Image (cartoon, rainbow, N blue to C red):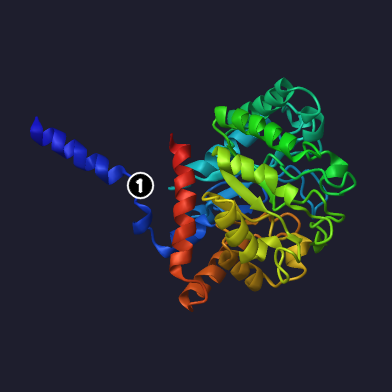
Amino acid sequence: MRIRIAALFLLALCLLPAPASAADLDTMIGQMILAGFRGFSVNQDSTVIRDIRERHLGGVILFDYDMLWGSGQRNIRSAEQVRTLLRDLKAAADIPLFLAVDQEGGKVQRLKARYGFRETPSAADICAGDEAGVRRAGGTVGATLASVGFNLDFAPVVDVNINPDSPAIGKIGRSFSSDPEQVARCAAIFMDALHRAGVLSCLKHFPGHGSAGSDSHKGLTDVTTTWSETELIPYRELIRSGKADMIMTAHIFNAHLDPKYPATLSGKVITGLLREQLGFGGVIITDDMDMGAIADEYGRREAVRRAIQAGADILLFGNNLAYDENIVEKVHTLIRGMVNDGTIPEARIRASFERIMRLKESLRR
């Protein structure tokens, strides 16, 4: 009997995932990439499946609309189709995948009624009512995502509605409120509802996009004269509460925070402000690296290098504003090369990997 118990114990140890310290460099780099792809289904020959198996891709993001094709021929057609797609992606991974989508409500929700999903009102609309309305909306979103297999929602937006005419935020109702305390309250309720459904949240867009007069999808957005420290209040409160799973950086430029680089590429903003001053020890992800504010201003190598050196843990390539079937391979190769030539220390990669794995551990529970 004792021999049998010992054998079972040894078998169990063998089945445990390798500790972060034992992970090889290629695995750690792959976990730092989250990417989009084309297709309603996948098979063994799909590029994204090869990226998951061979390059240890850390996560995927699904869209319902293909920006370059100008059509709905992307990833989302029905609940059953999405459920099968996510199941097949998940089955290919030896490390849990972040299975992500932008499901905020209102103008930004990829899972739409025409595909058979339940839609919710915008952040501005739900936060203008009572707390029960925010809780219902968050519960609907959480249940909807969990029902088909998503485990990460790129929401809620905690940008303060400083400029109601901001094209990417206020004008389309993505901000909860012009009151930063109210933003924090509504975001906390929404996040709690996601967590009850087993879905991780992601606060965005740090350090605050609500005062912007232009859209960073289209080019460099300068908030030097419009941004204020009140925009940090939701982050400060939600970080202090322990609710923040992940935070997304904004591609905004603010000379008062960094006279040289936009937030996504700024060590002063990511490491200095978010990590050291606000005390966030969780996962930091960039906004889409294909957006004009980054893609049009910096080459890919420089943008990738600066984002990692600044302190970003995950680089998001939505692969929708631009499309490259081999984007994961190319970015992985870039990062590997920068580690090999000493541009980026391996310790920097390992630090991000360990933060990512701590968050992914919650997906196993």
The quadrant of the rendering that contains the N terminus is top left
Amino acid type, label 1: Pro
Q: Nearer the viewer, residue 357 or 282?
A: 282
Residue positioned 62% across, 62% down in the render: 327
Q: Position of residue 179 (x, y in %)?
A: 78, 38
Q: Position of residue 193 (x, y in %)?
A: 62, 28
Secondary structure of the residue carrying tag 1 is loop
Q: Position of residue 238 (x, y in %)?
A: 61, 40
Work out whether 218 lies above or below 132: below
Q: Going by the image, does 117 lie left or right of 14?
A: right
Q: Nearer the viewer, residue 202 or 62?
A: 202
Work out whether 263 lies above or below 44: below
Give the residue number, with chain letter if any, for mark 1: 17
Residue positioned 68% across, 24% down in the render: 135
Q: In the image as oriented, which residue stretches furthest toward the bottom?
A: 341
Q: Nearer the viewer, residue 45 or 331?
A: 331
Q: Position of residue 256 (x, y in %)?
A: 74, 64
Q: In the image as oriented, which residue stretches furthest toward the right?
A: 165
Residue positioned 86% across, 49% down in the render: 166
Residue positioned 35% across, 47% down in the render: 17
Q: Is residue 55 visible?
A: no
